Amino acid sequence: MQTTTLPAPRPAIRLRADALRNRERIVTAAREMFTEFGPDVPLDEIARRAGVGNATVYRNFPDRDALVREVVCSVMERTVAAAEDALAETGDAFEALERFVHAAAAERVSALCPMVESTFDKNHPDLEASRLRCEQLIGEIMDRAKAAGQLRADVGIGDLMVAVAQLSRPPAGTLCLNADRFVHRHLQLFLDGLRAPARSALPGTALTMEDLRKT
């Protein structure tokens, strides 16, 4: 199995400790409010939840697009870190895959991903770098799990991403934050279905990220 070199994480912004804490509070508050109310939530409300002044928000993020982009990138980087940590701790590729899937659900990926298509330039270099790093790492983990006989051979990374997005999406009329009680249960059922040996043949062919981008 060939191992590719993952792109380096985005360089950390050098800030004073208090400024860094403020920035992190803003990103956390924005993620929560984007999930609850969508990307059009007033920045003033985000500042209020973060416990900072409006000027602090605009000093860190000159416009809404910059803040949305930072939220999406930070979510992808934390889900990647969850998979990397699991792989380092156990060496078990399937466990790393499970950690990634549950972390993605906990980060509300299904609620945040539509913003990539609707609110800003999805080809921005920061977003591209985070997305490529995520896709390459999860692709390699899936390859390792297949080589170890843990993961069925007829699934691709696109299949995984579609299932995570769909299974962690709250039903219509249901608050996203109230869905946790069954989201992780359903995701674990899905993950158990990925284990080798396969119990049935899947229709069609394994889905790639390129296939998803063409839809």
Image (spheres, helix red, strand yellow):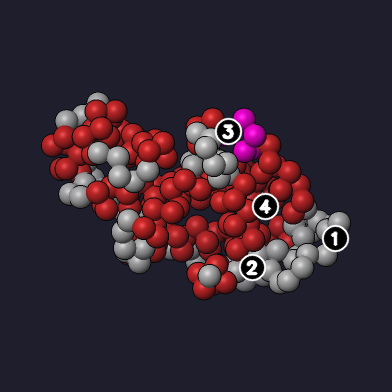
Q: Amino acid at mark 4?
A: Ala
Residue occupying the point 51% across, 48% down: 110
Which mark is on residue 180?
A: 3
Residue 208 x %, y %: 60, 69
Q: Amino acid at mark 2?
A: Leu
Magenta residues, dominant SS class: helix
- N-terminal of the pair, mark 3 or mark 1, is 3
Q: Secondary structure at mark 3?
A: helix
What is the span of residues highlighted in magenta in the rendered image?
179-184
Q: Nearer the viewer, mark 4 or mark 3?
A: 3
- N-terminal of the pair, mark 4 or mark 1, is 4
Q: Amino acid at mark 1?
A: Ser
Residue 58 x %, y %: 16, 43
Residue 76 x %, y %: 45, 51
Q: Amino acid at mark 3?
A: Asp
Which mark is on residue 200?
A: 1
Image-based side of 10 in relation to 107, left or right: left
Which mark is on residue 207?
A: 2
Q: Nearer the viewer, residue 179 or 152?
A: 179
Q: Secondary structure at mark 4?
A: helix
Residue 85 visible at all:
no
Report how far apart the C-alphas of labels 1 and 2 lie in the structure: 17 Å
- N-terminal of the pair, mark 2 or mark 3, is 3
- N-terminal of the pair, mark 1 or mark 2, is 1
Image quarter of residue 124: bottom left
Q: Nearer the viewer, mark 4 or mark 2?
A: 2
Report how far apart the C-alphas of labels 2 and 3 lie in the structure: 27 Å
